[in-house]
Image: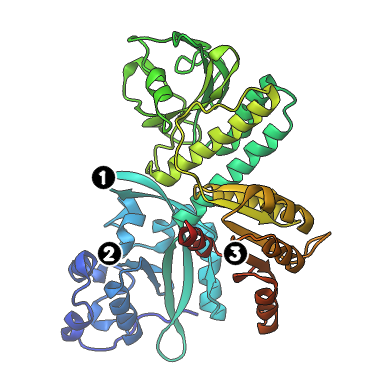
Amino acid sequence: MIEASRKAQPFREAPDFLAGGGELGERTRALQWTRTPLGSPGEWPQPLRHALRLMLASRQPMSLWWGDGHTHLYNDACRVLLGTGHPSALGMAARVVWGDWWDELEPRADAAIRRHEGSTTAPLRFLVERHGRALESYFTMSAHAVPGEHGAIGGVLWTFNDITASVLREREMAALSSLRRHLAGAKDARAAFAQAGEGLAAARHDLPFVALYSVDAARTEARLAARCGAAAASEALPEAITLGDACPWPFPAALMEREGARVRLDDPRFGRLPHGPWDRAPREALMLPVCALDGGATLVLVAGLNPYRVVDDAFERFVDLAASAIASAIQVRAQVPSQEARPPERRATRILVADDNRDAAETLQIMLEMMGSEVRIAKDGQQAVEIAAAFAPDLILMDIGMPKLDGHEACARIRAAGSDAFIVALTGWAQDEDKARSRQSGFDEHLVKPVDPAKLESLVAAIT
């Protein structure tokens, strides 16, 4: 049972525990609490006062549910998560405030109250007002029982952890993996166009619509090769586009730069744009040159961008990796010389991933490519030695338990061949003797699986 509010300290002490706390501190002091189940602040139990003081002073988003009715209190950092629910959410029943997530939250609150069990939700999506616009954001909510007086539980304190970056990165990696699987099944260049369109369906949250256009050598016409997220009769992405001043899509500008062209989509000539799973169409699109085609034509990717994301370097790199995957598939199948449709750039960090677990290797490959690296994969120790000799990697991530040659033997042979690459052992073993053996084999670092993405990023940055 949750302990109900009971008389505690006189009301004259209320300003002490309600002092400070920014806007929510002011609103908490001003609210007519006698109209809520909590009653007058002068009668609030001491544990509630302590929990409220802690919450109001914290910079981490927090929400406090108190009493049998789960009366809702929260701090300044939690305001943005409530959106239009702020400030009316103060003093309301938590069921009303968090109705969209109630089925997820109520059992966790009950476990905290009845069994003193802490728990954390799966990622929950919020549209948070930042930089003057609503942005897609993800948080987990962790429930903690708050003791009341006389041994009972007084309420539940929820803390929020922002995991937006990791959720978006995992989603991008899954989309790139899907694209590659689809492209691998294409038998020729024409099939690769169609498979690219199907594979990009997995990216619909980040790329609500995508189209591939073949621009002729004279730069007078663009013809549709594939599209995803748009109807067959789409006015925004038609079968053929005559280039010139009347065309809103800047194909010539996109072909001139490696980075392509960012396009604002507020021109009425675009017509009605597809919006995918969102309630509004993209604000911007990215146009990238993909690769050269027969007869001097060039393939261009047109991608509508998630209207609830900031288009930063990481987002642009994701689109660029999708374009690169499509280019590789088409050039191999069409046997078109791999002349770049984009100007050359500084050499990327070369990384060799050696792991007989294909899924693990591809996950690392996608993660590293999203950091801007050039990656090769070896499926066994012998292949790792051969690729290292030809590829001359800057960094090698080597699994220990591989067929043909294990990681220790492969590393020793790569060192004997004169490689000065930074070589990292990837293993499930972390005892001192395991680390000592890695050093003896020639490894520079010993990491335990699964690899922390932040650690991986710092490694890449250190050798760049």
User: What amino acid is labelled 3 in the image?
Assistant: Val
Q: Is residue 58 above or below residue 127?
A: below
Q: Dot 2, crowdedness within 10 Å: few (<14), some or many (≥20)?
A: many
Nearer the viewer's eye, disc 1 or disc 3?
3
The numbered dot on residue 373 is none
What's the CA distance linking mark 1 and mark 3?
36 Å
Please give the residue where the numbered disc 1 appears in the rendered image. 132
Q: Between residues 198 and 422, which one lies in front from this camera angle?
A: 422
Q: Nearer the viewer, residue 188 or 132?
A: 188
Q: Residue furthest bottom?
A: 150
Residue found at x 35% / y 85%: 47
Q: Nearer the viewer, mark 2 or mark 1?
A: 1
C-alpha gap between disc 3 and disc 2: 35 Å
In percent of the image, x 35 and y 80: which residue is there? 5
What amino acid is at disc 1?
A: Gly
- Disc 1 crowd, CA 10 A, few/some/many (<14, 14-19, 20+): few
Question: Few, some or many C-alpha atoms within 10 Å of disc 3 (few <14, some 14-19, many ≥20)?
Answer: few
Q: Residue 198: percent from the left, percent from the top?
A: 64, 29
Q: Which residue is mark 3?
A: 451
Residue 261 drawn at (x, y percent): 38, 28
The residue to which callout 2 is attached is: 76
Residue closest to the eye, 25 or 401: 401
